[in-house]
Structure formats: structure tokens, C-alpha cells
Image: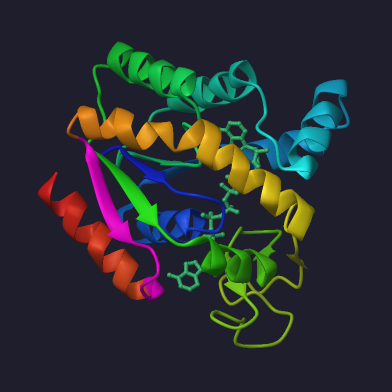
Amino acid sequence: MVNVILLGPPGAGKGTQAKRLVDERGMVQLSTGDMLREARTSGTAMGRRVAEVMDRGELVTDDIVIGLIAEKLAQGAKGGFIFDGFPRTLPQADALGDLLEKMDQGLDAVIEMQVDDAALVARVSGRYTCGQCGEVYHDQTRPTKVDGVCDACGSHDLRRRADDNADALRTRLMEYYKKTSPLIGYYYAKGQLAPVDGLAEIDAVGAAIAKILDKS
Ligand code: AP5
């Protein structure tokens, strides 16, 4: 069993690689972005506040996301957890360490997915996902085999995200550099950081991650 963090800016490929690890290793993907997108459709006052913050491209408060993760961790995972988009701040990283310690577990690797800003803009602006199973596609690099139909589950519910626009992306990148990138030093100091070239093709990135996890 391994627990791994996928760390990287918006569009780095975290969700794409997390899905592969779920399929190939039976791990459990914990995406705070997906959890928050679910929360925003709840119709509650909290859901509406979350939606406004996400649409601007800003980070949701630490207490909300830590609460979501704590709930999921309590459910356990035989193959291990993939933390996708969490932690994103130093307080979130400390909270994750404490939660895992209480479960007598730890982190096996923190994969830093390195991608430059120009590629991120191209990736995010071409992205669409399946609203039913969460499979991730791209207009140019990974289109569905049949137009408008999800390859993985056959659904016609293909969606684009409200925060995948130029203004929100600028804010998301700024939030990443200001609040999330300090985690690179945090995990480097703990000897857990493993960088991968996120500009490589999807299969090559997957192979690089597999190599790191097999050594953990
Ligand atoms: P979240 O949903 O986590 O979004 P994100 O971090 O901005 O990351 P993305 O989902 O945009 O990108 P990704 O790295 O998963 O890339 P993907 O695989 O899709 O968060 C959204 C919002 O929720 C945040 O802005 C914030 O408001 C809130 N939030 C979430 N977590 C939070 C937290 N912990 N604390 C506070 N707030 C939080 O790939 C992108 C595209 O590129 C796809 O089309 C894909 O097909 C393509 N692609 C992927 N890999 C490759 C490759 N190697 N080569 C070519 N194309 C590729």
C-alpha cells in the first residue's frame, strides 16, 4: 500500500495520472477539486460560497478542505490514497501529516509534476471531462474516440469547467505560486519530493510515476 501526493499547478495532469493509478493499482483518488465541485451543487449556503470562490480561481478555506479529506481518510483504502490537489497550503500539509499519523500511516512519495505556464494555458483551455465518471479529455491531445461520447463509460455528459477561462486561470496560477509552491520546499526538506517531467506524453509521465512508486 502506498500513499502519494500529486503536486503541481492547474493543468499539470494530476487528475489524468490519478485516474491511471486508480485503474492500474486500485488506489483511491482523493481530489479536493472534485469534492468541492460536488459540494457546490448541494444547494446549501456553503455550496454557494464554495462556487463563488472556485469560479474566481481562489483557494477555498483550509478548514473546509481539511474536513472533507478527514472524512474520506476515515473510510480507508486498501491500495493506498492518491492526494490530487491536496494539500495546497502549508496548514493543509501539516493537517494531512497529523491525520495520517493518527492512522499509523505516512506519505510514501510527493510527485512534483513540472510543467511550464504556456503548456498549462493550452491544456486547461482544451480540457473537458465526463460528468458521470470523471474521465479527462483534451480537444487536441486526448479527444474522445467518438465525438461527444465518453470512451470510459459511454456517457454523453461531457462538460467544461467554469474556472477554465483566462481570468480564472491567471488567478489559479497566482494562488499556486503564492500558496502551494512553498510545499515543494516543505516536502524536499522531508526527503519525500520526487519531480517528474509533466511535459512528456501522458503514458511517459505515467511510467515515470510508476517507477517512483515501485521504489517506495
Ligand atoms: P482542482 O480541481 O484541483 O483543479 P487544479 O489544481 O486547478 O487542477 P486541474 O484539475 O485544473 O488540473 P490537473 O492537474 O488535474 O490536470 P488534468 O489531468 O485535468 O481545483 C479547482 C479549484 O478547487 C481550485 O482552484 C480551488 O478553488 C478549489 N480547491 C481544490 N482543492 C483545494 C484545496 N486543497 N484547497 C483549497 N481550494 C481547493 O489535465 C489538464 C488537461 O491536460 C486535460 O485536458 C488532459 O487531457 C491534458 N493532459 C494531461 N496530461 C497531459 C500530458 N502529459 N500531455 C498532454 N496533455 C495532457
Vertical order, 31 against 142 (above or below): above
Q: Is residue 148 visible?
A: yes
Left or right: 52 as drawn, with respect to 128: right
- Label total for image: 0
User: Image point 68% across, 59% down: which residue?
Assistant: 132
- 35 vs 48, left or right, is left
Task: Return the x and y of residue 187 as percentages of the image width and height.
Answer: 28, 32
Q: Nearer the viewer, residue 118 or 145?
A: 118
> In x, y percent, where is residue 140?
60, 83
Query: Please, which residue is most extreme toward the left here?
Result: 215
Residue that appears at 66% across and 88% down = 146
Q: Position of residue 60 (x, y in %)?
A: 67, 28
Please state the extent of the stretch shown in magenta in the rendering.
192-202
Q: 61 left or right of 84?
A: right
Question: What residue is shown at x 47% (from left), y 17% (from top)?
Answer: 91
Residue 31 appears anywhere in the view: no
Is residue 200 magenta-colored? yes
Q: Position of residue 155 (x, y in %)?
A: 71, 70
162 in the magenta segment: no
What colour scheme has been applied to the protein in the rendered image? rainbow
Q: Name the residue at 29% across, 37% down.
A: 3
Q: Is residue 47 left or right of residue 128?
A: right
Above or below — where is 157 with respect to 44? below
Q: Quadrant of the N terminus?
A: top left
